[in-house]
Image (tube, helix red, strand yellow):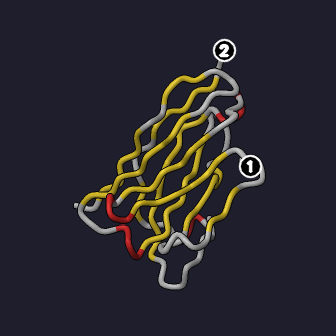
Amino acid sequence: QLQLVESGGGLVQPGGSLRLSCAASGFTLDYYAIGWFRQAPGKEREGVSCISSSGGSTNYADSVKGRFTISRDNAKNTVYLQMNSLKPEDTAVYYCAAAPDLFGIASMSPIRFDHWGQGTQVTVSS
C-alpha cells in the first residue's frame, strides 16, 4: 500500500522552529518530487515548497522564503521541511504529496501530485 506519513507538527511559539518529516512506505521516493502544502481554517490549500526527485531543484512560496528549507534523504525515503522563524500565520495543517518526476521539476502545481499524506497540525501561538 502506497502511503505518505507526515510527522513533526505541534505547538510552537512565534519565532520558534519545527521540522516536519514526510516518510513514504510501499514505494520509493527516488523518482518523485515531493511537495509540502498547507491549509488553514477557512482558507484554500496553498503550496509551501517542493523538491525535485534528485533534490537538485527546490521551490518556495514567497511567504516562506528565507525561513523554510526543504530537503530529502532518499536513503531514508523521507523528505523534511525545516521551518524557522515561525509566525502565527503559518498555523495550518501541513500535507506532503508525491508527484512522478522524470525531469527534475520542482513545480508546486497541485494537479501533478497523485499521492497525499493525511497531514500534521502546526500551531504557532504564544
> The residue under label 2 is which amino acid type?
Ser
User: Relative to 115, is 57 on the left or the right?
Assistant: right
Across and down, in percent, residue 26 comes to 23, 63
Query: In the image, what residue type sits under mark 1?
Result: Gly
> Looking at the figure, which quarter contains the N terminus?
bottom left
Q: Residue furthest right?
A: 62
Q: Quadrant of the C terminus?
A: top right
Q: How many marks?
A: 2
Q: Secondary structure at mark 1?
A: loop
Q: Earlier in the sequence, mark 2 or mark 1?
A: 1
Cα distance, mark 2 to mark 1? 22 Å
| In the image: residue 54, left or right of residue 84 | left
Q: Is residue 53 above or below residue 118?
A: below
In percent of width and height, residue 107 lies at 63, 70
Residue at position x 64%, y 52% in the image: 48
Tell me where residue 116 sits by quadrant.
bottom left
Q: Residue at x 45, y 56 (%)?
A: 79
Above or below 9: residue 126: above
Residue 58: percent from left, percent from top: 62, 66
Q: Looking at the rendered structure, which numbered label has been put on residue 66?
A: 1
Residue located 48% across and 42% down the image = 20
Look at mark 2 in the image and give the residue it sits on.
126
**Residue 121 image position (x, y, % from top left):** 50, 33
Q: Of residues 71 and 48, which is closer to you in this image?
A: 71
| Circle 1 crowding by C-alpha within 10 Å: few under 14, some 14–19, many from 20 | few
| SS type, badge 2 | loop
Q: Is residue 80 above or below residue 52?
A: above
Depth check: give the residue in front, 92 or 124: 124
